[in-house]
Image: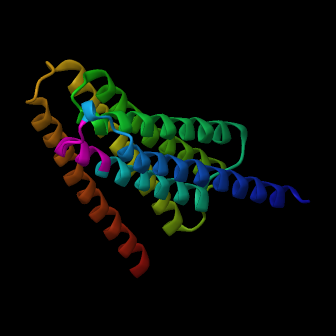
Amino acid sequence: MSHAASDERTVQRLEAFSDIVIGFSLAQLGASLAFIKPAMTLNAGGVAAFIISFAIVCSLWYFHHRLFERFFVPTALPIVLNFVWLANVVLLVFVSVHSAGTGFAERNPTLLYFGLYGLAYAILAVQTALGMRERPAADPALRLKGIGNICFMTYWALVFCAAFALVDQMPWSNSIGGDLSMTFGIGAAGSILMSIYFRRKKAALTNA
């Protein structure tokens, strides 16, 4: 088997294993609703936590898929980072299950929740950057896509870090929910602007 064929098989096996772990994590998140104790009644905050967690884990899978589709290089550091990322996702779902039951009523799990999300996006950004450095893309459109992925994931890692710092520094009270909503609202607005920017850059490349 040639070196290129061996690398391709390694990437396929790693992606398949990653999909299994992510799928198991999503199943765990869904199954958790059947095991919430009466003392941890699923309130509106818990439902929101579940829906948001499900959506963000799905988005993490999507960007992980895009990483493996174009930019993942099966060398030692990216492989280790992939396993760290998977462990991070499993732990994140565990924390999400707890948060769904408490509605983010506890400080430390909330800190861990935001910290893990920030780390997940940061690892994906680093892996994409490593892949682009190892195998520079000759296609300008592909290079732009890689840069866009790095910017988007770095941006959301910073948004989650900001939420982490907010929870860590501010007095813990019901009012913190409004501050967090504002943080993620600003984050979403910035993400939309970033998407528009890269969409225009892509259109300019296409029309050039």
Is residue 208 visible in the rendered image? The answer is no
| Residue ID at (48%, 34%) | 91
Q: Quadrant of the C terminus?
A: bottom left
Is residue 109 visible in the rendered image? The answer is yes
Q: Is residue 42 above or below residue 64?
A: above
> Which residue is at the front of the view, 138 or 119?
119
Spot the residue most to the left. 175
- Residue 41 lies, in percent from the top left, at 23, 38
Q: Which residues are magenta?
A: 41-50
Q: Is residue 98 above or below residue 134?
A: above
Q: Is residue 200 above or below residue 189?
A: below
Using the rendered view, name the quadrant where residue 194 is placed.
bottom left
- Residue 43 lies, in percent from the top left, at 19, 42
| Residue ID at (46%, 62%) | 144
Residue 199 on the magenta span: no
> Which residue is at the front of the view, 49 or 152?
49
With 175 as the anchor, is 152 left or right in this view? right
